[in-house]
């Protein structure tokens, strides 16, 4: 079922921002941007078109369910949920996997097979799915609030919903967030050059776990 709240949020993103690959520090390919803007406008104005995109996305995402869960709510703690994610961020990540600038073998091989239409369809499909929030530790979440607001809110938002092309992390698996932060802090992240290397460098082990659980808690606040 189409989630009205998510649909409205996506509409606001599309109306208020350029389609930029924020994490790659480059604009996405023009033909991919054109495909995204065209289909996004269509589903924004036509509920039947949105249903078609969701049906097509669900069918194309069948191979994604093992890691990312049914309709994008991950059930395995070390994998990200994609449901309700910022569609521009998703599109950017799919493109990075497709062109090899983000390194993960399974995703590289899979994304290389996607047409522009499939990339856009998947991004919009997952953006419109309702997220099943992850479990979190309430005490760790309480301790992580200050560090999150000081270090993470500028890009990911005070509520964790993402700004411009940045990731939504509210309700995300805390184990996954912690893993990503540790990869950035070690300098061994498979992602492109990012401000996250500097931000994560000042986080202790305890800080990382606390911030991860706070971000996971945001979906339920």
Image: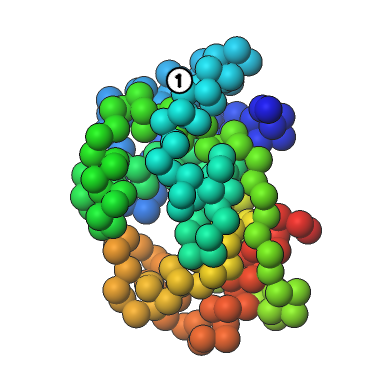
- Identify whether 118 is placed above or below 70: above
Q: Would you name the residue on which mark 1 appears?
A: 39
Q: Quadrant of residue 89?
A: top left
Report x, y in % for residue 162.
Answer: 56, 51
Residue displayed at 44% across by 37% down: 62
User: Which one is nearer the viewer's eye here, 186 or 66?
Assistant: 66
Q: Quadrant of residue 196?
A: bottom left
User: Which one is nearer the viewer's eye here, 142 or 156?
Assistant: 142
Left or right, 108 with reference to 45: left
- Identify whether 153 is placed above or below 213: above
Residue displayed at 56% across by 40% down: 71
Residue displayed at 29% across by 41% down: 111
Outermost residue, right side: 221
Q: Residues within 10 Å of mark 1 (few under 14, many from 20)?
A: some
- Identify whether 2 is placed above or below 62: above
Report x, y in % for residue 211.
Answer: 60, 73
Quadrant in the picture for the C terminus:
bottom right
- Identify whether 119 is placed above or below 131: above
Q: Quadrant of residue 61?
A: top left
Report x, y in % for residue 114.
Answer: 29, 32
Residue 122 visible at all: yes
Residue 152 visible at all: no
Quadrant in the picture for the N terminus:
top right
């Amino acid at each position: 079922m189409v989630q009205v709240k998510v649909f409205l949020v996506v509409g606001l993103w599309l109306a208020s921002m350029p389609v930029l690959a924020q994490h790659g520090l480059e604009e996405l390919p023009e033909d991919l941007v054109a495909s995204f803007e065209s289909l996004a406008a269509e589903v924004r104005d036509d509920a039947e078109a949105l249903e078609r995109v969701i049906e097509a996305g669900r069918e194309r995402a069948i191979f994604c369910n093992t890691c990312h869960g049914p309709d994008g709510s991950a059930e395995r703690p070390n994998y990200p949920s994609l449901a309700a994610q910022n569609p521009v961020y998703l599109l950017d990540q799919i493109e990075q996997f497709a062109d090899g600038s983000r390194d993960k073998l399974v995703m590289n091989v899979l994304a290389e097979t996607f047409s522009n239409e499939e990339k856009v369809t998947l991004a919009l499909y997952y953006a419109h799915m309702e997220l099943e929030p992850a479990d979190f530790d309430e005490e760790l979440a309480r301790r992580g609030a200050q560090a999150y607001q000081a270090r993470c809110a500028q890009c990911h938002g005070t509520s964790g919903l993402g700004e411009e092309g940045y990731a939504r992390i509210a309700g995300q698996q805390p184990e996954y967030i912690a893993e990503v932060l540790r990869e950035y802090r070690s300098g061994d992240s498979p992602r492109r050059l990012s401000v996250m290397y500097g931000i994560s460098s000042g986080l202790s082990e305890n800080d990382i776990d606390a911030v991860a659980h706070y971000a996971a808690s945001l979906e339920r606040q």
